Image (tube, grey):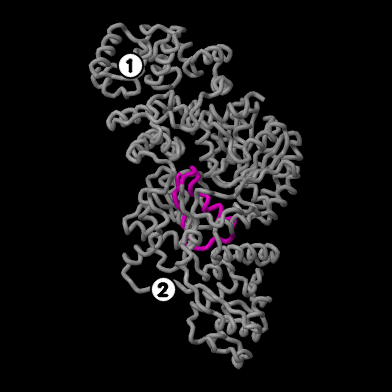
Amino acid sequence: MLHKPHQILRSVFGYEDFRLEQERAISTVLRGEDSFVLMPTGGGKSLCYQVPALCLDGLTLVVSPLIALMKDQVDALRLNGVEAAYLNSTLDEGDQRMLANRLRQGEIRILYVAPERLVTERFLNFLATLNPVLFAIDEAHCISQWGHDFRPEYRELSRLKERFPNVPLIALTATADEQTRRDIVAQLAIPQKNIFVSSFNRANIRYFVEPKHDTYEKIVAHVRQRKGESGIIYTLSRASAESLADRLKADGFSALPYHAGLERAVRTRHQDLFLRDEVQIVCATIAFGMGIDKSNVRYVIHHDLPKNIESYYQETGRAGRDGLMSDAILLYSNADVMKLQKMLVIEDNPEQTRILIQKLQEMRKYAESRQCRRKYLLKYFGENFSPDEQSCGSCDVCLKPAQEQEFFDATLHAQKFFSAMIRTGERFGAGYVIEVLRGNTAKVRLEHLNLKTFGVGADTSAAEWRRIANELCNEGWCERDNGEYPILKLNEKSKAVLYDGEKVMLPKAEERKRSSRREREIAATPKFAARDTTSAIPHNEQLFERLRVVRRSIAESEGVPPFMVLSDATLMQLATYLPVSVQEIRYIAGFGEVKTERYGEKFAREIQDFTVEHQLPSQMNSLPQKRERSRESASSASSTSSSVQRVNTDVSKGLNATAFETLRLLKDGNTPETIASMRDLARSTIFEHLASCVAAGKIPLNDIVTEEKEEAIIDALREQEWREGQGLKLVKEALGEGFEYGEIRAVIAAYPR
């Protein structure tokens, strides 16, 4: 093992501590054992294989089913200085040959590949020549027929252990119920002791289910509250995705469709615009999905019902991956259940059809339930939500005051409904029972036209009967079969209502009145999603927006989406604690060594300018994770240098690894300008390194600052009455062109106060 996990976590990814089950999973891999990791979306499951990949000496192979996600992962790793690549159908023959050569030369640490390519004999033979050290199977639920996205080619991945029995394998997923988990573990022969299941609870996501009426107004109301923020709206059909995007655009919103029916180039362009924050809303089909890793999606709206809870959980999990508060809104109609039920029938596979429809019925139960949404989701995945807490405080059920819910005596309605069920033989679903109650001669069988219950419910609307039927089932007054046809059955509670006069109290329907579109939109505004609740971090909003501009500029020059440069959560830390130097920025989560070197100066300068303009003091002393990085971490950060022992010595005397490398090159006779070119760093960054060398007593001041400049800087500091802790913008402006911030800091370092 070349490095320790904590060294990699700090120096490469910029984080101090592991989360959830990351550390245990990584330790298992490094012991050479196979493991299974179930971790919620946004929980950091990628680090479970990326960290050990950088600890081990060799190639890590990652199996991923999504081309777009492969590219995102590779781009993100490269920004952190990790040599990664992907092999899929987007590469032409020339690119593939070039990649093969780089793999043979050992230049690639992490390779992403699609499962279809991996299981070919040709690729397996090629892989054998590369001596892989780790296999990671992402989206492992695709292995199981019980998984919501079963893929036959994933079944073939068990061949990896046959061909490479001594290479550890880690299977990872964010969505798998107990049955799916057992299937995955059995297929890959993973030991029970190496199964790591983290909590499914996404505490930063608020869950809401709303009836599907005034649908567009509800969507618009929410989008208005989240103005300028990224969101995904899922629809059942391509036509709906197109029409919704067009309607939103016509109303002045930044929206585009995304589905499999679009030409590949158009789809790619729409995705890129969304990833780069140039388009705020994407309307996407549920069937096609969005294989993206965009961290700053603030809301996911389901215009139509997902096929199962796993898909719903995964899709809602695309919001708030950066840990900031986000919303998941489901617009529900029973008509969606009927549509999906027909779509899920597989003619030649009744067993798979049964599984799919059973999962759809679970999704329906969730949408119709009046219990805490979070508790319901966690229970589905086999987890109990904080038994001491009665309310999650962040879903529509828990946020609605109990006194707002009015009830009515529905005993007579229930008796009529249960009686109709009995007289029709308990062989039908709610829809048919309602037709009998309503006296619909066109839709009721001849043998049921003379039933005593035929037409006894004609005074109640079909919509109200459907609502009552759902409530009766949800509250356990009767049972609904989970088969292809949701047949209703009586139970002990229903019999008590029919024969013992048990009273049934059900919630009243919400009143709806005719109103203008704008009135409906205002009424639909989700009061739970106020703008000031997007984050628990009390950041400076004005500075945050300025930092977003800096981030976008860097992203454009790097050719990557802004969120890959730094997450919104990292920008919020910057806008909260106000680090005004590269040294201080190293303490901010998300700044590894490479990102600090590449971007630290730009962000520090922007923050420094802002704090001077607004006379704000730094808040770095209140940063919870501010502490000296361990000596071990500092030495790890220098592992790419050829002078590890010298770096260790100098780090202990006050220099970090990257500053020492600059010092070494300076002592070899290179000028700061030459060093900047050699290291592909900005001149300003090199001068920051040299300023720290002066402060550490490694070089005299006049090695980097002429005597004339030294005098001019001292005069400017005196004229501006500069004091420790102040920014340097006014001093720099007084000096004019030809002076670096690093030179000013070097002079300050040489004259400690």
Q: Position of residue 511 (x, y in %)?
A: 41, 73
For marks 2 and 1, give the CA distance: 68 Å
Q: Residues within 10 Å of mark 1 (few under 14, many from 20)?
A: many
Q: Which residue is mark 2?
A: 511
Q: Amino acid at mark 1?
A: Ile
Q: Is residue 315 magenta?
A: yes
Quadrant location of residue 434?
bottom right
Q: Is residue 252 visible?
A: yes
Q: Earlier in the sequence, mark 2 or mark 1?
A: 2
Q: Position of residue 712 (x, y in %)?
A: 26, 11
Secondary element under disc 2, as helix, strand or loop, is loop
Residues rendered magenta in the picture: 296-324
Residue displayed at 42% across by 15% down: 692
Q: Residues within 10 Å of mark 2 (few under 14, many from 20)?
A: few
Quadrant location of residue 34?
top right
Q: Which residue is mark 1?
A: 744
The answer to the question of whether label 2 and label 1 lie on touching residues, with beta carbons closer than 8 A, is no
